[in-house]
Image (tube, coloured by chain):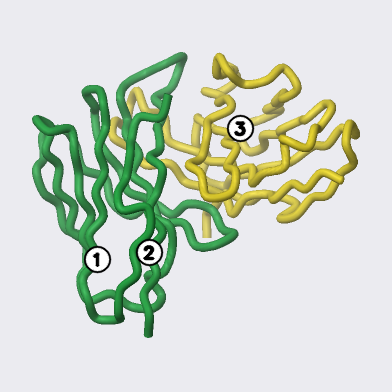
Chain colours: A yellow, B green
């Protein structure tokens, strides 16, 4: 089935040690999003790509970066993780919303990041 | 800032009963969407209602939208234990940057007891 796949499901890293989370999709969607979700909270958008056009949310810390080498893959890099970065990180995709309006987003199962 | 607020924050019901969750938002929207999230998993899209629609059905789900009150409700009929999950409303309020974005509400944790 076409889907959004996130690897790994669980990631443990040390305080200050860079970490990369990955997301791949077989839906051929133009738009890919990264969200941070802390326990019992709503997902918070960090940034999104529309094709290769990167859009950062104003309050996303500089510590968070993203790469999208091709349509199928997108990476979240956390350069120097702090204890406050422990969370579930969700990747999502959507179709070209300017051609197809009113589209839902399709989510992966997330990567739960723990910081030691 | 968070667009949607949901109530109740938590809801516990018996299997077979109906569950109603409410969502309020602050600005005009293109559409409103409901998502389910099982514990430790990603969000699953349930239903989308456009701003010019008032009610929509999908299986055991019924969603209403009142744009004058900036509110929506999700009704799950004849609930099952498998419906236990967190439910989020999300509003699509137009573009910011190059793509439309969703703003999620705070969520309702639904527990269905067998």
Disc marking residue A25: none
Label 3 SS: loop
Front-most of residues B8 and B44: B8
**Residue B108 as seen in the image, left or right of residue B61:** right
Residue under the image location 86 percent in, 44 percent down: A13
**Residue B90 as seen in the image, left or right of residue A27:** left
- Label 1 lies in what chain? B
Label 2 SS: strand
- The residue to which callout 1 is attached is B19
The location of residue B16, given as percent across then percent down, is 24, 81
The location of residue B6, given as percent across then percent down, is 32, 45
- Label 2 lies in what chain? B
- The residue to which callout 2 is attached is B110
Which residue of the protein is positioned furthest toward the bottom in this rendering?
B114
Name the front one of labels 1 and 3: 1
Between discs 1 and 2, the one toward the N terminus = 1
Q: Is residue A62 above or below residue A104?
A: above
Alpha-carbon distance for marks 2 and 3? 36 Å
Q: Quadrant of the N terminus of chain B?
A: top left
Label 2: few (<14), some (14–19) or many (≥20) C-alpha neighbours in 10 Å: many
**Share a chain, discs 2 and 3?**
no
Residue under the image location 32 percent in, 21 percent down: B94
Name the front one of labels 2 and 3: 2
Front-most of residues A55 and A43: A43
- The residue to which callout 3 is attached is A71
């Amino acid at each position: 089935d076409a889907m959004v796949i996130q690897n790994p499901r669980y990631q443990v890293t040390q305080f200050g040690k860079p970490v990369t989370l990955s997301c791949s999709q077989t839906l051929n969607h133009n738009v890919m999003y990264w969200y941070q979700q802390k326990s019992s909270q709503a997902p918070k958008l960090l940034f999104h790509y529309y094709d290769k056009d990167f859009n950062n949310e104003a309050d996303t810390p500089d510590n968070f970066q993203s790469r999208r080498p091709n349509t199928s893959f997108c990476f979240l890099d956390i350069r120097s993780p702090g204890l406050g970065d422990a969370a579930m990180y969700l990747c999502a995709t959507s179709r070209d919303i300017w051609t197809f309006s009113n589209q839902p987003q399709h989510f992966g199962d997330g990567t739960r990041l723990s910081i030691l | 800032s968070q667009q949607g607020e949901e109530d109740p924050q938590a809801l516990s019901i018996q299997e077979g009963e109906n569950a109603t969750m409410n969502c309020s938002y602050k600005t005009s929207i293109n559409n409103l969407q409901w998502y389910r999230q099982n514990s430790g998993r990603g969000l699953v899209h349930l239903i989308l209602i456009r701003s010019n629609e008032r009610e929509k059905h999908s299986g055991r789900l019924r969603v209403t939208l009142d744009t004058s009150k900036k509110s929506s409700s999700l009704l799950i009929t004849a609930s099952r234990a498998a419906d236990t999950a967190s439910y989020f409303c999300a509003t699509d309020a137009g573009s910011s940057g190059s793509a439309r974005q969703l703003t999620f509400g705070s969520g309702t944790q639904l527990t269905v007891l067998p």
